[in-house]
């Protein structure tokens, strides 16, 4: 399938801060692409660059295989960072301005207001909206012009739990129409529930990229102790071909095994070295710990 | 251009600040012109001379030009608002280019300049026909070209205000920089620069478009200063307007929104 967005070697410096460092990602058509990372990891910078409001220090990107232009922008709908509207205009008046800027028909405005649940409040001034309503109006504005790609930066920010569920359902509905969605979030849960693909960012560096299922299906953790001093266990473990990572944590050795490796194989290997392990515990990694591991792995 | 104007009108018409400043400008022009004509000089009302066609046009535009600060401030507010609301950013996301952003603000400048110049024209006709003695046909519009010079001057001032607003991005600071330059800084530079050069400085060229009706008397009292005639000033002013627009565009292009 074609790529909707193709980013090559994107970098951005703010003074001495390297906000984005050689980022290259591809967003396949029809995917829900999650950009995941803690605050300040470069998500908004990345989206700001591809949306043409931030100048990149280096690197290039293409939308639909072309450089960014008025015609590629018309195929996008985007919400970046905050809902940006004129506070003294009503919700509906603000959408009229947006529709004119996008050069699309005003006929869709009532339907969009209905979709984001603001039909009742369309004649209220934007400044009187709650944070959640502002966020919804911004999502509504992004939907104007029936774009092929939606770019949503923290779309559930400021929403109550009910609103969060609604927005997630909305995203999935839109994706079901064959549209591509690029979603930046610092909430792992959100990305995991909604996205098909993801990229994990930390300090402006790409830590992992691919289908959500493959990123999250990394190996389980194994904890061993007993039978020999911890140092010896650690040394032996590091020589084993199927152990990807070994380190001492408290009074145990924590091991990560290659995928599809059975923990009994580990036991057998130690036994072959003349060590009978006192304890061997396999622990399924929670999503959070996997995420933390990805973003903390500075060696990548 | 018309679609840009439509978008700008959608933002302007419901905006109370816009109406307040527009109303302020219109009433102050009226009050200034009225007051100046009703001072007694040697027991005679100055208006008798002031409100006569065709000299009226020069008087009126000269007085109106003193109030150019208000349209300038309005322009700074309109541009810096877009930074505060982050709507420039949203418009670029939604499909505008940086050049379109400058164009749309320039459209507002033209609209305001036409409105204010039309108002001054109406005001001139009103005062002239009411107080004037020589209201026979042709004399009424003799020298009415000063209203056109005033329009160009407004465009110049507001384009400069737009550039300042794009540069500093904050309303209060923008107004201060604008006032500091137009009222103080450039005058200090004039003082240090020979007339032959400083007559081409932006504020002096803009001022030359609406010359003082009493220029000859002032020159006698304050010494000869070298100033361009309105017609001579037209070309440099157009150049400055183009330059201010271009610099605004370059600022937008070089910085993140």
Image: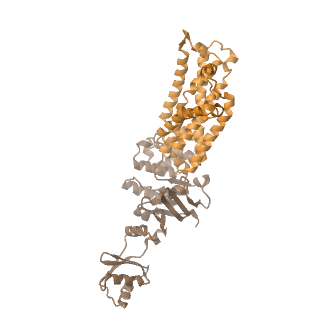
Residue B44 visible at all: yes
Q: Is residue A63 above or below residue A280?
A: above
Q: Up-down: is A95 above or below A11?
A: above
Residue B76, image x, y percentages: 52, 38
Q: Quadrant of residue A69?
A: bottom right
Farthest-out residue, right: B138
Specify the colour of chain A: brown
Residue B216 lies, with reference to residue A228, above or below; the image says above
Q: Position of residue A263 (x, y in %)?
A: 37, 82
Q: Which chain is orange?
A: B
- Give whichever of B202, B219 is nearer the camera: B219
At horizontal 69% and vertical 29% (from top left) the residue drawn is B231
Q: Position of residue A255 (x, y in %)?
A: 38, 78
Does B154 sit left or right of A91 as displayed? Answer: right
**Frontmost residue, A175 versus A184:** A184
Question: Where does the image place residue B207, in percent across and percent down from the top left?
Answer: 61, 29
């Amino acid at each position: 399938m074609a790529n909707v967005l193709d980013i090559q070697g994107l970098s951005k410096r703010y003074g001495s801060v390297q906000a984005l460092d050689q980022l290259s990602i591809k967003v396949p058509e029809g995917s829900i692409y999650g950009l995941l990372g803690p605050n300040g990891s470069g998500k908004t910078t990345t989206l700001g660059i591809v949306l043409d409001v931030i100048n990149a220090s280096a690197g290039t990107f293409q939308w639909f295989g072309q450089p960014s232009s008025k015609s590629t922008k018309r195929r996008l709908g985007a919400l970046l960072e905050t809902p940006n509207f004129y506070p003294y205009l009503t919700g509906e008046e603000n959408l009229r301005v947006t529709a004119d800027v996008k050069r699309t028909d005003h006929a869709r405005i009532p339907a969009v207001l209905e979709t984001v649940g603001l039909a009742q409040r369309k004649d209220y001034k934007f400044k009187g909206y709650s944070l959640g309503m502002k966020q919804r109006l911004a999502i509504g504005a992004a939907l104007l012009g029936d774009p092929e790609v939606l770019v949503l930066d923290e779309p559930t920010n400021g929403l109550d739990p009910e609103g969060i569920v609604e927005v997630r359902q909305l995203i999935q509905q839109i994706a079901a129409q064959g549209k591509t969605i690029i979603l930046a979030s610092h909430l792992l849960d959100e990305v995991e529930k909604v996205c098909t693909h993801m990229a994990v960012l930390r300090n402006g560096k790409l830590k992992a990229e691919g289908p959500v299922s493959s990123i999250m299906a990394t190996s389980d953790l194994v904890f061993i102790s007993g039978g020999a001093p911890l140092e010896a266990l650690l040394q032996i473990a590091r020589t084993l071909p199927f152990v990807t990572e070994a380190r001492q944590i408290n009074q145990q050795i924590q091991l990560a095994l290659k995928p599809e490796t059975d923990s009994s194989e580990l036991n057998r290997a130690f036994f072959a070295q003349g060590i009978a392990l006192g304890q061997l515990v396999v622990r399924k990694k929670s999503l959070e710990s996997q995420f933390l591991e990805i973003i903390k792995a500075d060696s990548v | 251009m018309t679609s840009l104007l439509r978008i700008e009108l959608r933002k302007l018409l419901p905006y109370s600040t816009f109406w307040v400043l527009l109303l302020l400008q219109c009433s102050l022009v009226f009050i200034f012109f009225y007051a100046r004509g009703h001072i007694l000089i040697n027991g005679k009302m100055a208006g008798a001379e002031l409100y006569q066609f065709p000299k009226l046009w020069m008087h009126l535009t000269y007085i109106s030009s003193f109030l150019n600060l208000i349209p300038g401030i309005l322009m700074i507010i309109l541009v810096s608002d877009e930074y505060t609301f982050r709507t420039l950013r949203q418009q670029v996301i939604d499909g505008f280019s940086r050049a379109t952003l400058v164009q749309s603000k320039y459209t507002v400048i033209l609209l305001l300049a036409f409105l204010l110049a039309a108002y001054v024209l109406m005001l001139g006709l009103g005062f002239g026909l009411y107080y004037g003695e020589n209201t026979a046909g042709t004399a009424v519009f003799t020298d009415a070209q000063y209203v056109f010079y005033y329009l160009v001057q407004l465009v110049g001032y507001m384009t400069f205000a737009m550039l300042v607003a794009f540069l500093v991005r904050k309303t209060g600071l923008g107004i201060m920089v604008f006032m500091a330059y137009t009222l103080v800084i450039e005058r200090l530079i004039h003082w240090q620069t020979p007339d032959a050069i400083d007559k081409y400085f932006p504020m002096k060229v803009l001022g030359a478009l609406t010359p003082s009706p009493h220029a000859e008397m002032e020159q006698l009292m304050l010494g000869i200063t070298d100033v361009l005639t309105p017609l001579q000033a037209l070309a440099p002013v157009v150049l400055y307007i183009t330059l201010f627009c271009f610099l605004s565009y370059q600022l937008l292009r070089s910085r993140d929104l």
